[in-house]
Amino acid sequence: MIEVDLELEVTPEELFDVITASILYDIKESTGKNVKRDQLHNNYTYKKKLKSKMGKEAGVKVTISKFEYPVVYEAKFESASGNNMMRYEVERLEHDHSGLAYIEDFEGSGKMAAMNGWLVGLVYNHKAKKDIKKRLRAMEKNIIENRAMDDDSFLEQEETEQ
């Protein structure tokens, strides 16, 4: 299991807007359906195709186990090799900051797959945590930069009024 806890300098809503956009994009790419945020709910399910590291295409069933904007998003990815679980849990902190707990877990189907998952986890977890932190910090940076661009809109307004 991989667990990453961070304090981010963005609001829970800003963070969840990015997470939600990613979910909606994945659903659109996988199913062709245009789904809106208010249509996401606990046990929402869709199927998608993923390529393995060996280049093979495999079907994956995605189930949104829990979706509570802007507090928690949890999804399960079921495939022939096992189940992956991913969870974002967000807590509102002072000064428009967020506490984020990110959890990822894998359960292999069968004893060999489970043992292989455990062994890979021993080697992979440290790098995975580092990569996840890097990805989450990049999301935070992007939100802050976009917020700053949105705040510059008053300059444009001022210019058009003159």
Image (cartoon, rainbow, N blue to C red):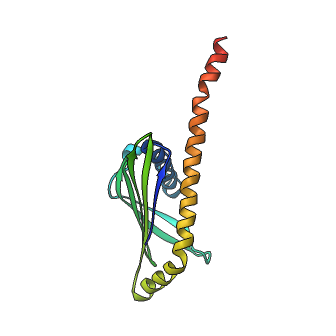
* Residue 51 visible, this angle: no
Q: Say if 147 sits above or below 81 in the image.
A: above
Q: Residue at x 49, y 78 (%)?
A: 121
Q: Say if 121 sits above or below 48 in the image.
A: below
Residue at the extreme top of the image, as rendered: 162
Q: Residue at x 50, y 80 (%)?
A: 122
The picture places residue 20, in percent across and down from the top left corner, at 46, 49
The picture places residue 103, in percent across and down from the top left corner, at 42, 64
Residue at the extreme bottom of the image, as rendered: 112
Q: Residue at x 37, y 43 (%)?
A: 38
For this rendering, which residue is in front, 25 or 66? 66
Name which quarter of the figure residue 96 lies in: top left
Name which quarter of the figure residue 92 lies in: top left
Q: Say if 146 sits above or below 43 in the image.
A: above
Image quarter of the C terminus? top right
The picture places residue 110, in percent across and down from the top left corner, at 39, 85
* Residue 21 visible, this angle: yes
The picture places residue 157, in percent across and down from the top left corner, at 61, 19
Q: Residue at x 44, y 88 (%)?
A: 112
Image quarter of the N terminus? bottom left
Number of dots carrying numbers = 0
Residue at the extreme front of the image, as rendered: 94
